[in-house]
Image (spheres, helix red, strand yellow):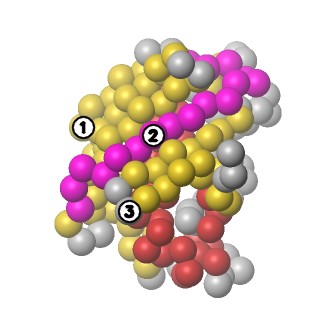
Amino acid sequence: MPTINIQNYLPHREPMLMADAIVEIGREHAVTSFFIKDDNIFVENGLFSEAGMIEHIAQTCSAIIGQDFGEDIRQSDDPGARVIGFITQIKKLTIKHKPAAGTEITSRATLLSQFGEICSIFCETFAGNTLLATAEISLFIKAV
């Protein structure tokens, strides 16, 4: 299946990039994939940590809103200088399993609501057919 370079939608770069590609995207949803490498900064004792899972989920969710800022990101030598974003709230979070290094995970995010630069998004993360995590988070994203 063709993928889209997520770096066209997010200002994140290594070592903080926690999504490799966008598998599917629309105005109110995004699906991303991420292969967890052994040397990832969020791998602890061979497992992708809770903090890594949250960052991956947030980046998947940000891809939906990042469509509005893609041109700002692509035109800059320093993508982070053009767009700021952060998690404003984690309303619900359940991490059922931490995936091992060497696992490819997939996340599906759905926009619940948006008011200006603040949005609420629901996300599910899987390894194959195994549900790893669910979250409802709010994000703030703005061009600067």
Q: What whole-number distance in Å separates the C-alpha atoms at marks 1 and 3? A: 22 Å
As drawn, 59 above or below 140: above
Residue that mark 1 sits on: 91
Instruction: Tell whether 54 sits left or right of 38.
Output: left
- Is residue 111 a member of the stretch shown in magenta? yes
As measured in the structure, the alpha-carbon distance from the residue carrying label 2 to the one carrying label 3 is: 13 Å
The quadrant in which the N terminus is found is top right
Residue span colored magenta: 98-114
Q: Nearer the viewer, residue 103 or 80?
A: 103
- Tag 2's secondary structure? strand
Q: Residues within 10 Å of mark 1 (few under 14, many from 20)?
A: few
Please tell me which residue lies in front, 25 or 142. 25
- In the rendered image, the vertical position of residue 122 relative to residue 66, given as above or below: above
Q: Residue at x 52, y 33 (%)?
A: 53
Residue 127 is situated, as x and y percent measured from the top left of the image, at 58, 23
Q: Secondary structure at mark 3?
A: loop
Give the class, few, some or many, for how many residues have Cα within 10 Å of label 2's Cα (few <14, many ≥20): many
How crowded is the residue under tag 3: few (<14 C-alpha within 10 Å), some, or many (20+)? Answer: few
The quadrant in which residue 4 appears is bottom right
Residue at which label 2 appears? 108
* CB under 8 Å between discs 2 and 3: no
Amino acid residing under circle 3: Arg
User: For the residues carrying marks 1 and 2, which lies nearer the camera in this image?
Assistant: 2
Query: Where residue 140 sits: x, y (%)?
Result: 34, 62
Q: Is residue 13 left or right of residue 119?
A: right
Q: Position of residue 95 (x, y in %)?
A: 42, 21
Q: Is residue 103 visible?
A: yes
Magenta highlight: main SS: strand
Give the residue drawn at x 32%, y 41%.
Answer: 122
Please give the residue where the numbered disc 3 appears in the rendered image.
27
Disc 1 marks which amino acid? Lys
- Residue 70: mark: none
